[in-house]
Image (cartoon, rainbow, N blue to C red):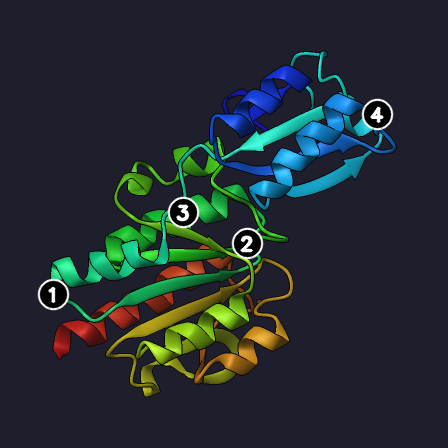
Amino acid sequence: MNNESMIEGRNAVLEAFRSGKTVDRLYVLDGCQDGPVLTIKREAKKQDTIIKYVDKDRLDQMSQTGHHQGVIAVSAAYDYSEMEDIFANAEKKGEAPFIIILDGIEDPHNLGAIIRTANLVGAHGVIIPKNRAVGLTATVARTSAGALNYTPVVKVTNLSKTIEELKERGLWFVCADMEGEVMYDLNLTGPIGLVIGNEGEGVSRLVREKCDFVAKIPMKGDIDSLNASVAMGVLSFEIARQRLKK
């Protein structure tokens, strides 16, 4: 974790919540129930912040100051956008919406690289889940090489429900999986969402079931998997190629 994305100590954490700072996760000493900590937890719940209960050794390991006082907040290096920001981005460019949906990307370098590629390929925004995924940490910001200043990133509670809502707005969805059709054989034009799974398990079953198509990247090597950010790059540039032809 990075100093610029961590807030330690009860007063500092409480002030961060009350000032409206975006906090991705709150780590609390397991079993700590005194008044100040209960107040911090109430503020965290108002923001729908994830609360994780950990032992003292874990907090000591995370701490950069040695004075965490039983609470450490991990704040977003950048503010999250709203879904309407993505659609406004597409409308401003006069293009059909092109959205990247990430199902549980946990490596901040992967997320930063994906946001960078999303900007370069012309995607109008990125959607990430609230749980079991990295947020907009300082490492993500650095790895994105400035793309976070231009590419909206939206955090949602439920990816499956979000996909259903976006379908009602005219989008259709393709996810990456080695069991799918070769990507060159698919029509990837129009309003589209590209779903990329996490580094180990790929796209979850519930999310995959919501997708209209499953795309396979043809590979000739001796291993059968790609880094998540590389797979996203390959598929998203194929989408961009097909959109250029329309």
Task: Indicate left or right for 223 with 109 as reference.
Answer: right
Do the CB atoms of the residues marked 3 and 1 lie less than 8 Å apart? no
Per the image, the residue denoted by label 3 is: 113
Label 2 to label 3, Cα distance in Å? 11 Å
Residue 199: mark: none
**Looking at the image, is 130 positioned above or below residue 140?**
below
User: Nearer the N terminus, badge 1 or badge 4?
Assistant: 4
Per the image, the residue denoted by label 1 is: 94
Task: Indicate left or right for 200 with 88 as reference.
Answer: right
Q: Can residue 238 be seen in this view?
A: yes
Residue 183: x, y in percent? 37, 80
**Local SS, label 1:** loop
Q: Residue at x 34, y 64 (%)?
A: 99
Q: Residue at x 33, y 37 (%)?
A: 145
Label 3 to label 1, Cα distance in Å? 26 Å
Residue 69: x, y in percent? 75, 17
Per the image, the residue denoted by label 4 is: 56
